[in-house]
Each structure stands twice: as C-alpha cells, then as structure tokens.
Amino acid sequence: MSDLKMLAETEFKWIAGKLDYDGELLFVRYNLTAERWMENPEFSVMLRFFVPFNDNIGLEDKLLNKTSQVNLIEDIIREVVFSSITSIHVMCLTNSMMREFVFYVTECEDTDQKVKEIHQRISQKVTSHEVQCMAVCEPDWRSYKRYTQMEKVCIFIS
C-alpha cells in the first residue's frame, strides 16, 4: 500500500469510453492504474456514490453543459474520501439519470461507521444535489472488471 500513497494523482492513467448498457448509453471512465491493486486484500470494500441529475435534459447536454457542476461534486467526494480512509478512485459511470463514483477502500475496524461519517460529510458539503452512498464487500473487484472488460464503442486515453 505504501506505493499507493507515494503515487501522485496526476500519475493515474484514465480511460474513457461509451457503451450500450441494457439499451442505454453509458459513459465509463476508469482508472487503468488501479489494476495494480486489483484484488489486493487490503482494498476489499467497494464504496459507491450516486449523484442523480436535477434536470431532464439529454445525456450529451449533461456531459457538455453540466460537467463543471458535477466535477465540483466529484472533487468534494474525492477530497472527503481520500482524507478519511485509504482508498483508490477507480471509476465514474454516467448515464442520463446520474453519475456514479466508485472507490475501493481498505476495511477498517468500524467500516460501516466510517462510511456513514464520510457520507454525512459529503452531504453537508454538497447542497445542490442529493448524494447517495453504498458500500459492499467486494474483494474480487467484480464491478471494476465488469465495466473495464466490456467492449467499448470508442476509447479515449488521458
């Protein structure tokens, strides 16, 4: 885990693409560098945050016109998670209804309470949108694998 702490956020490599997921367009951005820690027993809890969009405009308009607001929310979520628990931000999923931020975190003595505190801190800082939270034990990283191994329509590397 020490190399995770030493790796600067700018050194992470992200891949983005869009795919058809059950008949709906889904934009996926995932952290390719996170594969280094895939299935590491220390990162056994998947922590997910869902931010429903507040309007009914189309998905492409959301991506073009709403990203600055959603990016601010992403920054807040990342700041709170990173300052609260050892974690890796592995993925963002965007569809017409919401954006989801996915982390894998280390399990601690009182993970449930820690997750509640993190969610509460985020909810206090984000007043423009509802932020939903869910944590599940997922030591095999199956959610990360499911989206990173799907065939994408187009891929961008950053």
Image (tube, rainbow, N blue to C red):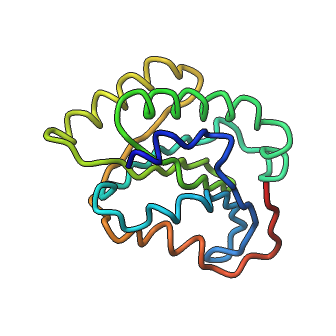
Q: Nearer the viewer, residue 132 or 112?
A: 112
Comparing 78 with 64, the one in front is 78
Q: Tell whether 73 sits left or right of 152.
A: left
Q: Name the one closer to the observer, 40 or 154.
A: 40
Q: Residue furthest left?
A: 109
Query: Where does residue 12 sit, x and y in percent of width and height?
Result: 64, 50
- In the displayed structure, would residue 112 be above or below residue 31? above
Residue 122 locus on image (x, y percent):
44, 26
Q: Is residue 63 above or below residue 143?
A: above
Based on the displayed image, in which of its 4 quarters is residue 94 positioned? bottom right
Quarter of the image that includes the C terminus: bottom right
In the image shown, does 105 or 135 lie closer to the viewer?
105
Left or right, 113 with reference to 157: left
Extreme-bottom residue of the structure = 151
In-image side of 63 versus 6 (left or right) = right
Residue 132 is situated, as x and y percent measured from the top left of the image, at 43, 40
**At x 72% / y 72%, what residue is drawn?**
19
Figure quadrant of residue 123: top left
**Going 48% across and 35% down the picture, which residue do you hit?**
131
Question: Residue at point 64% right, 35% down?
Answer: 54
Residue 10, percent from left and from top: 68, 41
